Image (spheres, grey):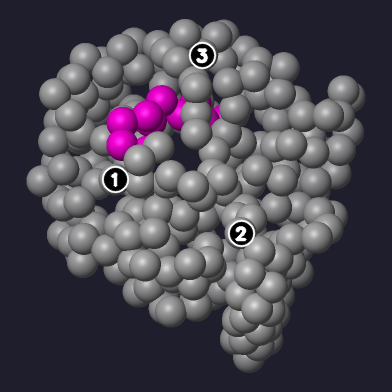
Amino acid sequence: MVSGNSLLELCLVTADVDLAAKAENAGVERVLVDLETIGKAERQAGQNLFHSTHTLDDVCRLRNVLCNAKLMVRTNPLYEGSSTEVHDVLDAGADIVMLPMARSADDALRFVDLIQARATVSILIENSVALEALPTIVRVPDVSEIHVGLNDLRLSMGFSLLFEPLLAGYVDQAAQVVHDAGLRFGFGGVASPRTVNLPVRAERIIGEQVRLGSRLAWLGRSFRESVARDVTGRSMRQDVEAIRACAREWSRRGPEELEANREAIAREVEAWRQSRSPTMVAT
């Protein structure tokens, strides 16, 4: 699954028009408006994770700003109002629409039917049930990409730390299924290698993105918070360039070095566990 290049699409989660424009100018390929609220606060209670306050109006505002970056929208999980919600998101101009908390091929098929080929369909895999159903989900026509969300996945599997599903091999399994189906694959998020004091070094996670052939990654909370304070956008450009350079460097490494990086991640996660830091890098 190791990639020979670094075609990693980066996605910034924001409803801030100015920040979205900076991201586009910095070379970020996607901006995501997050409309998911149903059930999220309950399942992530006490986890210090990002809970969105984005609205449909934010989708419209960003549509008027973005020229090159794709506008991505995460809807709510399927519910009685999904038809109206998806219709409104499509009318607002979303390029990519993501379904969170999918659990089956039937969920994916229903979502595809709602999209009606008006946008790219992205399915977010973030629970153990969805992992088991993934071989059937990837066969649903018009599903274009699969993203594995580490925060909810580790909660659903009873792990305490963010990267434990990665080290346990679950993301490897998902990546193989997605690649075999010929779909785009992504997981979790990345921070800039310039970011300090992370429990697992950002460059190591970028190495895992390369090892697993990932094409999609969200820019984590540490990235958003640092660039939000930068008026000129210079810091954002530097951070994006640092991520690109790191991915290119890892893509030149052999399987042995990539596996050694994975082992180093395991050591850093174990040190994190020993410190019992509750902080998570939200994606």
Q: Is residue 82 magenta?
A: no
Labelled pair 1, 2 in contact (Cβ < 8 Å)? no
Among numbered discs 3 and 2, the one appearing first in the sequence: 3
Depth check: give the residue in front, 276 or 264: 276
Furthest-left residue in this view: 106
Give, as a three-letter code, the residue at label 3: Asp
Q: CA distance from mark 1 to mark 3?
A: 22 Å
Residue 62, relative to residue 76: is it above or below?
A: above
Furthest-bottom residue in this view: 256
Q: Which mark is residue 58?
A: 3
Among numbered discs 1 and 3, the one appearing first in the sequence: 3
Tell me: 257 left or right of 47. right
Q: CA distance from mark 3 to mark 2?
A: 31 Å
Depth check: give the residue in front, 204 or 215: 204
The residue where tag 2 is placed is 278
Q: Residue at x 71, y 23 (%)?
A: 19
- The answer to whether residue 216 shows anywhere in this view is no
Q: Residue 75 appears at what percent x and percent y?
A: 34, 29
The mark total stands at 3
Tell me: 134 left or right of 123. left
The residue where tag 1 is placed is 101
Give, as a three-letter code, the residue at label 1: Met
Badge 2 marks a residue whose secondary structure is: loop
Q: Residue at x 80, y 46 (%)?
A: 239
Tell me: 232 left or right of 25. right
Displayed quadrant of residue 178: bottom left
Which region of the structure is painted magenta? Answer: 30-40
For discs 3 and 2, the disc positioned in front in the rendered view: 2
Residue 89, relative to residue 74: is it above or below?
A: above
Q: Is residue 33 magenta?
A: yes
For discs 1 and 2, the disc positioned in front in the rendered view: 2
Among numbered discs 1 and 2, the one appearing first in the sequence: 1
